[in-house]
Amino acid sequence: MTEFRTIDDLDLAGKRVLLRADLNVPMQDGKVSDRTRIRRLAPTIKELAGAGARVVVMSHFGRPKGVKVDGLSLGPLIDDLSEAVGQPVSFARDCIGAAPEEAIEVLEDGGVVLLENLRFH
């Protein structure tokens, strides 16, 4: 029989947790027009951060086909995500290479960072 565990069963203090999220939210004029997906994700992020994890959130956005498209950056979600989780969320301007490595390295226990759109690569 498979044993199921929840976040409450894990010692996450000081550990990096990579969270794959669905942040493909509707945008209008460069701003989030429907925050439903962000609000639904927030309790999970809060619980992980509250347990002392260093939360690394990754997501795709749109269909840029492996090309960096400014209009499909996850950067504009930072304010809404920060508000939803009740703490500042930092942003790594890429999802591979030095930018995310540096952003994750300086992340404190309970901190949250959002990586740039996975579909840029």
Image: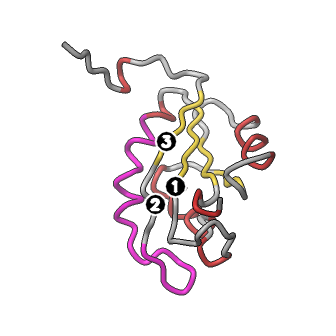
| Residue 79 among those drawn in magenta | no
Q: Amino acid at mark 2?
A: Leu
Q: Which residues are magenta?
A: 26-47
Disc 1 target residue:
59
Q: Quadrant of the N terminus?
A: top left
Tag 3 near tag 2, CB within 8 Å? no
| Mark 2 neighbour density, 10 Å: few (under 14) some (14–19) many (20 or more) | many
Q: Quadrant of residue 44?
A: top left
Separation (CA) of disc 3 from disc 1: 9 Å
Tell which residue pokes out farthest to the front in this image: 65
Residue carrying label 2: 23
The three-letter code of the residue at mark 1 reads: Ser
Q: CA distance from mark 2 to mark 1?
A: 6 Å
Counting from the top left corner in percent of width and height, residue 19 is at 49, 41
SS at circle 2: loop
Q: Is residue 54 above or below residue 36?
A: above
- Residue 71 image offset from top left, x and y in percent: 62, 78
Q: What quarter of the picture does the C terminus occupy? A: bottom right
Image location (x, y in percent) of residue 78: 59, 61
| Relative height, residue 65 to residue 16 (above, below) | below
Tag 2 and tag 1, C-beta contact below 8 Å? yes
Circle 1 residues within 10 Å: few <14, some 14–19, many ≥20: some
Q: Residue at x 78, y 49 (%)?
A: 99
